[in-house]
Amino acid sequence: MALKEDVVNAIADILDVKADEIKDSETLYDSIGVDSTEMVELCVSLGKKFGIKIATNEITKSSTPLEIAALVEKKK
Amino acid sequence: MKERVAITGIGVVSPAGLKKETFWANLKRGDSFIDEITRFDASLYPSRIAGQVHELDHYSHLPSRLVKKIDVFSHMALVASEQALQDAKIDLNNVDKKRVGIFMGNAIGGWLFAETELRDMYIEGREGVSPYMASAWFPAAPQGQITIFYGFKGYSKTVVADKASSALALWYAAKNISEGKNDYVLAGGMEAPITPYALLSSNSCGQLSKNNLNPRKAYKPYDLYRDGFVLGEGSGIVNLEKEEHAQKRGAHIYGFLKGVGFSSDGYHYERYSPNSESFEYAIEECLKDAGWTKKEIDYICLDAEATTFGDYLETQALKNVFGKELKNISLSAPKSMYGNLLGAQTALDLISTLYSMSNNLVFPTINYEMNDPYCDLDYTPNVAKERKINKALLFARGRGGINVVLAVEK
């Protein structure tokens, strides 16, 4: 749960959006309308933040924060 | 051009002001807005003075999420676009966005974003650069950002033609409106050359003033002691539509674009041809296109390169084309106050000329002190002059002799 919150806060920080705009079970596209360049930025910056490598096909516009948190947990 | 095209909205971001009212009021005063470059350490550059835009953020309503992804030249263009749309009083909820186009010009692109990323990559040994760089640096980026921000989907283009970029963009936009391809076009230009690399590139052309100790006096076109122009940054954007369309919706019309003349020197990649024939041809073609006689011209907004050769050629072209009629034409270069915005310059020249037309006032060419026997015309030195203006020409010359002349009418 704490990790999921960390992921949401990290996404908000990286994309310069408010954390409460990001809904746990909504896709990133549906909740904050991410574009493809922001997705690349997210993969790289989330990877740095959590000390892991995330390939650009591992999280997409259709990913939800819950799914991203699960991926981060698995890779840590 | 068969039909004249109405100008119904104005947006301006310039060293002399970030709103049209401020810009015009400052030009009226005849002050200089050139100063030492403070944005970065420019102490080793031969020319380290410029007209800089301050407080852009204060005038910007863009979300920070977007600002971090774009270069400052797109940011300035988005601010100017918002002003132009508001000034034109276009109800964006009730326009067919497939009929709104964007025609923009710039010469350099968005280097602040690009060079910062590249520097960090080389110095820090990063694995990559920001993904936003892909869409931040290239000359068509502002066009793209404006279309995305407002959802405009009409026919659009970006022109890169050195100092004639926005002159050509304005003209293609007017043609597009005239041919009925779009209902509205936002047209103009943007330039952000006050960055370490862009300033270096601009210095290498050898046309910039090195009068670093006296910035406010440095840009002195046609003066005997001129030593080049001074860079400026900013954006000028106007809204264009058909005259009938503007009248029908009760829009305020500032003036009309009426004709254009083009030519290329075809001589050298950077230098002008040593005679002014090609430039004269562009002026003659513009008069022909507008259907005007030389006697009808009230005002010419000059190119004002402020180099020995550039000003001489421009003066020769004026003498050869207009002959005795020159004494009845007011000439000036308001850009001497705020710097030369390269690819965006003609858009700013258009905006200052529209004020001159509405208010019967010619903005001056400042810093004119010593008469050059080879540049011996009345360039409206130092002080604004009252003058009724109905028909005007705007001169733009890109390096290597890209000559564009626009005809503007009240």
Image (cartoon, helix red, strand yellow):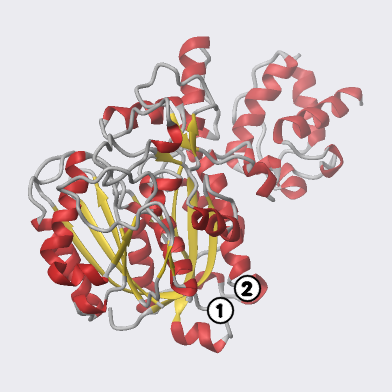
- The disc, 2 or 1, on the residue closer to the chain's N-terminal end is 2
Disc 2 and disc 1 in contact, CB within 8 angstroms? yes
Residue B252's disc number: 1
Q: CA distance from mark 2 to mark 1?
A: 9 Å
* Amino acid type of the residue that numbered disc 2 sits on in the rendered structure: Lys
* Amino acid type of the residue that numbered disc 1 sits on in the rendered structure: His
- State the residue position of label 2: B89
* Whether residue A74 is situated above or below residue A5 in the rendered picture: above
> Which x, y percent locates residue A14?
71, 30
Dot 2: element: loop
> Which x, y percent locates residue A72?
76, 22
Dot 1: element: loop
Chain letter for the residue marked with disc 2 in the picture:
B
The residue that appears at 28% across and 38% down in the rendered structure is B226
The residue that appears at 57% across and 80% down in the rendered structure is B251
Outermost residue on the front side: it is B370
Q: Residues within 10 Å of mark 1 (few under 14, many from 20)?
A: some
Residue A49's disc number: none
Q: Residues within 10 Å of mark 2 (few under 14, many from 20)?
A: some
What is the number of callouts on the image? Answer: 2
> Which x, y percent locates residue B91?
65, 74
Q: Is residue B326 left or right of residue B234?
A: left
The residue that appears at 76% across and 13% down in the rendered structure is A76
Image quarter of residue B57: top right
